[in-house]
Image (spheres, rainbow, N blue to C red):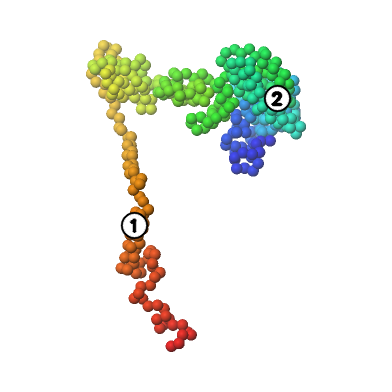
Amino acid sequence: MGCDSCGTGKPNGCKSNGGCSTGGCNRMNVHDWLMNLPFSDPESTCKIIEVSFNRGSRKDFFRNATLQYFEKGDYVTVEGVGGFDMGEVTLTGELVRLQMKKKGMDELNPEMKKVLRPGSDKDIELFQQNKAREPQALIRSRAIARQLNLQMKLTEVEIQADGKKATFFYIAEDRVDFRELIKIYAAEFRVKVEMRQIGIRQEAAKVGGIGSCGRELCCSTWLSDFKSVTTTMARYQNLSINQSKLSGQCGRLKCCLNYELDTYLDALQHFPENADTLDTAKGVATLIKRDIFKNLMWYILPGSVKQYPLAIQRVKEIKRMNSRGEKAVELQPVELLNTKITETEPVFADVVGQITLQSLEKSSNRKRDKEKHDHRRNPNSPGHGNQGQRSPHQKSPQNRPWQQRPNDKK
């Protein structure tokens, strides 16, 4: 039971058969690349399935104790807190074992919740009714928290499929005493209340959006583990420490600063260490940046704004000279070819008020007179407006005896 209306161009949606290029039906969508591979022992296949809730906002593993075989996109009814819950199957088969091993979960855990049955029409109808209550519950819960002057921000409300439990996700900088808040929520919504604190990165993942790269946020589509990001990672990659450019929509440093960090660290191993300063005859040269793509180290001399690109081998030679107490006479910078193309800006003339209706009429009359003059000199020339007119020297068909009509009198 995949999505039945999306922009894939297929009738009635993709039906979870693939081809959904946006992943909007399930934010944390996973492609099962082991789905069509045959296995020699069917009995040893994984009996656990991965189920997502609230369009991929939350995922969990459940043991399939039934004899029913579930496919990706099927709605199943699973065990909940004091009742049942409903979610969408996102992963089955051997790939579930790999995901559980990645998250450090035991496949033989007896406390793992089970799948009760496939989602029936009655379960789906009750599930849709309770999901329709979530937007109004979020607005009302925010108003109550504001009345109690609690320093917290509610980001999402998730109501269980049977309507017996509601989970309130919130972010807060300090510890919040919400004992009185839970009592009001339980009386207002008539559900069992669970308060769950999340970080600001998790909030951005739930809200979603488009990053500065033009694509959907990584935390909303595939990223589930949030590692710490510091400005040191930006310095290793020779990025300017600009808080507005390095920060994501969550207000923290972008997670993508970690993606290429290992490549930069491997490349920086070839650069000499303790080469921040070089003793020269003109003064102490200070290192300002490293270019790992060209294997160059840029230095600047005191009292000068000119930058000197030095090769790695030259820097090592100067460091050996400094260790012997000698100073380099010249830095011997590398000559770089300037391949930058200078574009000349087009010059625009201000013609406002110079063109009038009279000037346009004069130009059209001048063009018409020129066409008449050309036609008189060459009457058979094509492309003129009066090419269908006859010259006064040409005779009409009535005056030509070989083109007389049969009924005309001779």
Residue 33 on image: x %, y %: 60, 33
Q: Which mark is residue 362?
A: 1
Q: How many marks?
A: 2
Q: Nearer the viewer, mark 2 or mark 1?
A: 1
Question: 10 Å neighbourhood of mark 2: few (<14), some, or many (≥20)?
Answer: many
Residue 119 visible, this angle: no
| Residue 341 visible (yes or no) | yes
The crowding category of the residue bearing disc 1, from other C-alpha atoms within 10 Å (few below 14, some 14 to 19, many at least 20), is few
Picture coordinates of residue 382, whole percent (x, y) = 37, 65
Q: Is residue 22 left or right of residue 114?
A: left
Please state which of residues 111 and 137 is positioned toward the viewer in this rendering. 137
Farthest bottom residue? 410
Q: Is residue 9 left or right of residue 376?
A: right
Tag 1: amino acid: Lys
Nearer-the-camera pick, 111 or 20:
20
Instruction: Write down the residue under mark 2.
Output: 160
In this rendering, the answer to whether 401 lies above or below 384 is below
